[in-house]
Every structure is written in structure tokens, then in C-alpha cells.
Amino acid sequence: MKSKVNRRRFLTTLGMGVAATQTFSLAAGNIYAPIGNNITPVNPSEQFHSIGLKNIKVGGEIGRRIDITVHNNLLKIDVDKDFLYSFQHKNISNEGFVGVGKLIDATVKLAIITGDEKVVALKKHLVDEIIKAQEADGYIGNMKAANRMTKMWDIHEMGYIIYGLVIDFELFGEKKSLESAQKAANYIINNWNLIDSEWEKSVNIAKHVGITGIQRTMLLLFNITGDKTYLEFCIRQINLPDWNPGIVIGRKNRIEGHIYGYMAASLAQLELYRLQKDDKLLIPTISALNFLTLHDGMAISGGAGQVEIWSDDQDGRGELGETCATAYQIRVYDSLLRLYGDLRFGDLMERTIFNALFGAQSPDGRQLRYFTPTEGVRVYHNTDTYCCPNNYRRIVADLPPMIYYRTGNGIAINIYTESNAEIEMGDFSVKVTQKTNYPVSGDVVIQVDPSKSALFGLKLRIPAWCKNGSIQINDEPDKIETKPGQFVDVERNWKTGDTIRLNMQMEWRLVKGRQRQAGRVAVMRGPLLFCLNPAQNDALAKLDGADLGKLIIDLGSIEKTPVTDKSVRPDGIGCKLKAGNASFGMGNTQNLSLILTEFADPNGKCTYFKTPEINEGVVDELVEKLI
Ligand SMILES: [Zn+2]
């Protein structure tokens, strides 16, 4: 049997040197200007396709996160008191955000993923009660009559309720959910004239932030119903095609640079682009992507921003990485991956999922965070309601379809995790199974079981961190070496039982900090970032109160084989190394024996350390031009 193996790198010659031509102007109110004039988006058309939620089973750490989110979080919530009450009584006069729509969306999807009858019952209860409380004119929020549409965050809340109801129709076929969603959407469209030019001033929130989510909701309704009213709303009433606010750095009045608001709108633009191939719809997304990867907008954990707003100072403390922003970054990467067929977006996805995202949840699953700093104390959000807890539940439910995709000539594997999927290929189907303990090791055994022998391609993402890797097909003697940041494409006549052994060697690496972290390094292995939890390290007791970031580490002192560490997860690992602390009179003697734990360790307090030889560090492989 003949194998054809292609290694390809997409789009390397297609960008227009944006980084070189952009200037960063602090003088212009810290606005990182729209960069449309410098970008030619190459007019992409859909390369990869989602396989949906229904035909995939996920284990490993991603599966465990889904499981604990369902059983230790979702099913522990008091939905009647915390989520439904205000909608049943419509008694809120201002700032009434709850997040019930996001909860509905998450619960519908988690009901499909788990098939758990308690989750299905919860979904039905949420949907039934919300529909029962809907008013005759279609209003579906929780505000008193005089405050509807205009007070924060009524449109935002309703937009997500409608979204959740449409997803209920899409996945469960519930017609009454769609009818209710359309009535509510029509209410918003009919009352949109209340959102005039004075509205921004009255609420002191930029309009695109205040209406976050409504754009994608209306596009979903158009895609489901074919009713052009919803498409026209996006094009004419909110002018989605021309939205391009630039990257505004730092929190100020009207929170213009709101990452969540920005990424939600750019995600909607990417979806509108699929309907009308207008290149300008890609510009704000590419602008944000370049800011994140090339201009220090993204922390090493994958999280971004301070106090919900774009930031490029690499300050790892405090309000870093709003969970909502993290969730929408992942969705935008997924959308770009499908559009450009470039698996390098998967590198951004796995970094963000395994670090910033899972760091936003307690190891037992019950508690969720608003922000997940890399330096200093991390705190949990104090309610089950509001944006971040519910966007966390939603994105966890959205992860399974990001593992496998359909491609033009076959299948792509993007995320490595124990899993299997049944993928429809036209007149046959393929069951793909991954056996792996990734991200503990980079060994993945992939079994391919087509329903009949067939010629198709199987693409594997080789992360940019993987400097040495290989694949072996069945027991064929020749191993094929992989290249970092490029995908392997094996096109052959596949038959049941065919197996690929993917070996990605995971080496410890020190990643150089930038901006405020310049001169220091963080420890990574594969997609995992490691942090220092003082409570895990008796050796630090004598340094009580010390600045942990002054500890000195070097690559040579790291034990090659990771140690077992259950701080985050049952199969978790730690990094054993020696550290010194010059400022405490010990010199660089490397006399402290320390364990660094996975970044999601809730008591992690420090990620960057000093090093005697900064050139042992490497530039973060995600600082790369993608489009
Ligand atoms: Zn949030």
C-alpha cells in the first residue's frame, strides 16, 4: 500500500508584512489603530468543517473538565433562585445581568454531550421557565417595563437567551424554543430605535460592548430560519460589516477596548464573511490576532488583557485574562482554523485551553474565576451567575468539535486527547480513536477504522514546540520525521485497524518573558505552563514574604522526567528543579529543591523566574505571524 505524505505550511507567503509596517501610537489615546490598509486577507474560503457535537466522545483532561463542570458545578447550581427568579418576576431596574442565556446554551450542549438525564431535565426546566415568563410582546429579559432595552445589560442578556433557545431547537428539535427565540428577536429589532446615538453616553459603555453577543445570535437565527430580517438587522441596523474599532489599550470610560466584546463581534464578522465574502470583515480579527501574537497582547498562559481590556505590558498580576475573553479567543482561533485550513491555530488553542482556561476552574470543578493571573494570588468569582462562570460552562461544551475536523480530502486532528469520533465522509464513515495521556506525554496512537477501505487524507497538527517528532504507520519500517509548526498529511488507502503512532518529544523549555517579564523565563513542557505554589514547597518556608519572581532557575537543574503531581488532576505532573535566591544572601547556589506544578494549580503564585543565562531561554513559539 502506497502512502503519500505531505508536509505543508500554509500561508507563509501570503501575508503582507503587517508587523513591519504597523506603528504603535501611544500619543493617539493608546489606540492601536485599525490596520486595514496594511492587510490583504487573501480571500479565504472554508477549508475545514466542524463535525458537530453528537459523534464524539472525549476523555483525558478535556473529558475530565467536561465531567467536573457537569457534576460538580452545573448540577450544583440553584437555578431557580439565582438564575430564573428575576426573569419570572421582571423586577430589575438596572444592571440586571444574570447570564441565564449563556447557562441555557451550555446546558443544552452538555445535555447532548453527556446524555445525562439530570442535565436533560435541567435544560428542559430552564427553557420551559424562561419561555413561560416571556411577555406577549416577545420581551424575554428580567427588567421592569420602563427599563427594557436601554438599561445594561438587557440586550446582552436577551441575545444569549435567544441564542440558547435556537441551539435547543438545533440540537433537540424543540420548535417552541425557536418560536420563542424569534418572538424575542423580533421584539429587539422592533425596539432597536431606542439604542440611538445618545445611548452610549447614557450608559457610559461603547455600543459594540453593550450589545455583545446580539450580532452572532441574529446571524444564527438567519442561518436556521432563512429569514432575511435577521441578516438585514446585522448589516443595516448594527452595521456589522463596517465595525472596526481598533485595539484600544487600557480601561477607560465606555470600556472601548473590551476584549470579550471585541472578540464576540469579530467572531460574528467571521460568520458573516461566510455569507458574503467581503474581505473587510476579516480585518478586525486579523488586527486582534496580530496584537495578541506579535505585539505582546497575550500572556504566556494564553489569557489576555487587564480588567477585561486589551493590554500589552505583559503584567501577569491581578485582573489578567477575563474568562469570557479566553473563551472567545478560543472560538476565534477555531473559526480561523476552519477558514484558512491552518492547524497552527491549534497551537494557540491548546496553549489557551490547558492553561488560561483550565486555570479558571478549581481542580474539583465547583469554582470558577473571573480572572486568572500568572503572578500573585488568584481568586474565585463569588457567584454562579454573571458572565465568566457561564461563558466557562459554554466553552467547555464547545471544545469537543475542536478536536477533529473534516477537511477537503479527509480528516484533521487538531487537539490531542483520549477520544474517539465517528466522522461522516459521504458514502462512508470513519471512526478515529486517539489513545494517549497527552499532555503528560506526546505519544499518541491513532486508530483509523473506515466503514470501507477508502482513499483519504489524515492531517496531524505538529505543534511548534515539538522540535523532534515522528510518525509510524502500522508496522511499516520507515518512520517519518515531523517538522515543528507544520502539519503532516498522510493520504493513503485506509483500511480498518490502520494505526498511526505519533511521537512528539516533550522537552522542558524556558520561555523568555517580554515587556514587564523581560529578563525572566517561564517553564514549559509541551503545551503546559508550570508555576510555583509556595504551599507545595517546604523549602520556601524560610523565604516567607520573598518575591518569588527573584528566584533563579536554570535549564540544567530540571530533572528530565516529570514527577507525579496531583494538585490539578489525578494524572498531573510537576517539574522538579533547583533554584537559588540571590537577594536572600544565598547567592546563585541552586540550593532550594522545588516542584513547579501545572499552571492550573489554584495556589500557583509565580510563573516567571530569573535565570543566570537568559539565552538558555527561547522566544515563545506562539509569537508568530499567522495571517
Ligand atoms: Zn466575563
Image (cartoon, grey):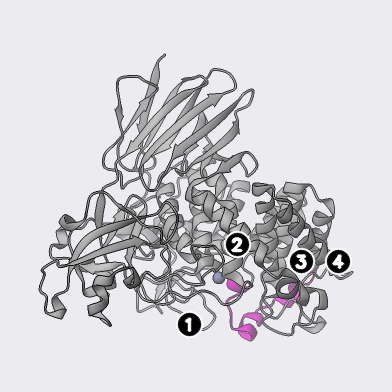
Q: CA distance from mark 4 to mark 2?
A: 28 Å
The location of residue 515, given as percent across then percent down, is 28, 70
The answer to whether residue 324 is left or right of residue 467 is right
Report if residue 487 lies within the magenta region: no
Which residue, as the protein is rendered here, is positioned at the far right? 136
Q: Which mark is residue 189?
A: 3
Callout 2: few (<14), some (14-19), or many (20+) C-alpha neighbours within 10 Å? some
Mark 4 or 3: the one toward you? 4
Which is nearer the eye, 554 or 575? 575
Distance from label 1 to label 2 (Cα)? 37 Å
State yes or no: discs 2 and 3 in contact (Cβ < 8 Å).
no
Mark found first going from the N terminus, 4 or 2: 2
Q: Name the residue rendered at 26%, 42% in the picture.
A: 467
- The magenta stretch is 190-210
Q: Are marks 4 and 3 in contact (CB under 8 Å)?
A: no
Going from the N terminus, do you reach mark 4 or mark 3 first? 4
* Tag shown at residue 12: none
